[in-house]
Amino acid sequence: MTTLRNERVRKALMREISDVIFREIKDPAICGMVSITDVDVSSDNTAARVFYSVYGTDEVKAKTSRALERHVGQIRHEIGKRIRLRKTPTLLFILDDSLEHGAKMLNLINKIEKGEL
């Protein structure tokens, strides 16, 4: 069950994590094509799963994943300064390929409609 407080924390984390990645992290492996798609916060706000998508090849996705893991401490530190919580949640970054999957499905549907399959 999501409480109003958890929802506010979730939205704040989405906004601030995205901002930290784009403004504070100066790593070329994290290109400008990273998008925070969702954040799932535990009921006690001590842990957060951060779902992100990356536009690019599998190699670009792997580099971005490694870079985010390298900088997770810095991102968490910045979040702690920006959002007033009793304890800054631990962050777990998870690649979200649902947008890519959706695009492939749409492409297949379009091909079926055109009779190409």
Image (cartoon, grey):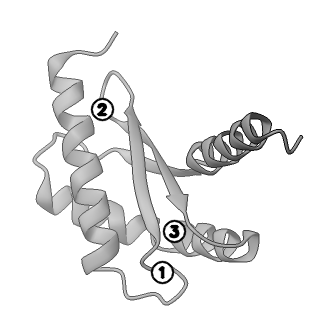
Looking at the image, which residue sits at the far top? Answer: 1
Q: Nearer the viewer, mark 3 or mark 2?
A: 3
**Place of residue 5 in the rendered image (x, y in percent of width and height, measured from the top left):** 15, 24
78 or 10: nearer the viewer: 10
Count of numbered labels shown in the rendering: 3
Q: Please indicate whether residue 116 sits to the left or right of residue 41 in the image.
A: right
Q: CA distance from mark 3 to mark 2?
A: 21 Å
| Left or right of residue 26: residue 85 | left
Q: Using the numbered discs, state the Cα–Cα distance from disc 1 to disc 2 in whole angstroms.
A: 29 Å
Say if mark 1 contacts mark 3, CB within 8 Å.
no
Residue identified by numbered label 2 = 45
Front tag of 1 and 2: 1
Residue depth check, mark 1 versus mark 3: number of the one nearer the observer: 1
Specify the farthest residue to the front.
114
Q: Position of residue 110 (x, y in %)?
A: 69, 41
Q: Nearer the viewer, residue 110 or 8?
A: 110
Crowd tier of the residue under label 2, counting other residues whose Cα lies within 10 Å: few below 14, some 14–19, many 20 or above: some
Q: Is residue 83 left or right of residue 14?
A: left
Rendered position, 88 above or below 53: above
Report the residue at 49% width, 79% height from top. 30
Q: Residues within 10 Å of mark 3 (few under 14, many from 20)?
A: many
Amino acid, disc 1: Cys
In the rendered structure, the answer to whether residue 32 lies left or right of residue 112 reads: left
**Which residue: 48% across, 81% down?**
31
For image coordinates 29% across by 49% down, the residue present is: 14
For residue 23, which numbered disc appears in the image? none
Q: Residue tagged by mark 3?
A: 68
Assign the C terminus to one quadrant of the image: top right
Q: Amino acid at mark 3?
A: Leu
Against 27, residue 66 (above or below) is: above
Name the disc covering residue 31, or none.
Answer: 1
**Residue 43: image location, x then y, percent:** 34, 21
